[in-house]
Image (tube, helix red, strand yellow):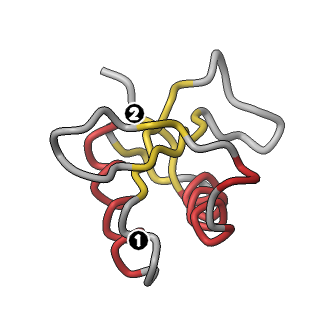
Amino acid sequence: MERELKTKEELIEILDEKIKKAKGCEGYRIEPSELAGPNAEGCNWSGLVFEVKSSKETPIEIPPLDRDARVDKIVEEARKRYNLKFR
């Protein structure tokens, strides 16, 4: 399956929408990060997961064992479907 190309901003918007739909995961933010090159599956980005408690606080990166597994599933599914488009 060929991945759709999205800008970082478009990908953040897509990921934010998916997070909002996952009840109980609203406080998370996924930040796409460019890889040096595509991985073995052809994906060219990874997703750093942050917890955002308010717009005034600095987001805190959340390690995999400390976050809701549904967030990782959202990242996994998005990485199969989208690649970052670089300017």
Counting from the top left corner in percent of width and height, residue 2 is at 60, 54
Q: Quadrant of residue 25?
A: bottom left
Please tell me how crowded label 1 is: few (under 14), some (14-19), or many (20+) other residues with Cα within 10 Å. Answer: some
Q: Quadrant of residue 66?
A: bottom right
Residue at the image point whose x is 61% and y is 23% from the top? 35
Q: Nearer the viewer, residue 24 or 7?
A: 24
Label drawn at residue 85: 2
Q: Are marks 1 and 2 in contact (CB under 8 Å)?
A: no
Counting from the top left corner in percent of width and height, residue 31 is at 43, 39
Please tell me how crowded label 2 is: few (under 14), some (14-19), or many (20+) other residues with Cα within 10 Å. Answer: some
Q: Nearer the viewer, residue 50 or 57?
A: 57
In terms of secondary structure, where does tag 2 sit?
loop
Q: Is 56 positioned to the left or the right of 30 in the image?
A: left
Which one is earlier in the sequence, the residue at label 1 or at label 2?
A: 1
Amino acid type of the residue tagged 1 in the rendering: Lys
Placement of 44 over or under 23, stated as above or below: above
Q: Quadrant of residue 68?
A: bottom right
Amino acid type of the residue tagged 2 in the rendering: Lys
Q: Quadrant of the N terminus?
A: bottom right
Q: Quadrant of the C terminus?
A: top left
Residue at the image point whose x is 57% and y is 64% from the top? 71
Nearest-to-viewer mark from 1 and 2: 1
Spatial separation of the CA atoms under disc 1 and disc 2: 20 Å
Q: Which residue is mark 1?
A: 18
In terms of secondary structure, where does tag 1 sit?
helix
Q: Nearer the viewer, residue 24 or 29?
A: 24
Q: Is 74 positioned to the left or the right of 56 in the image?
A: right
Counting from the top left corner in percent of width and height, residue 84 is at 45, 37
Residue at the top extreme? 36
Placement of 23 over or under 58, stated as above or below: below
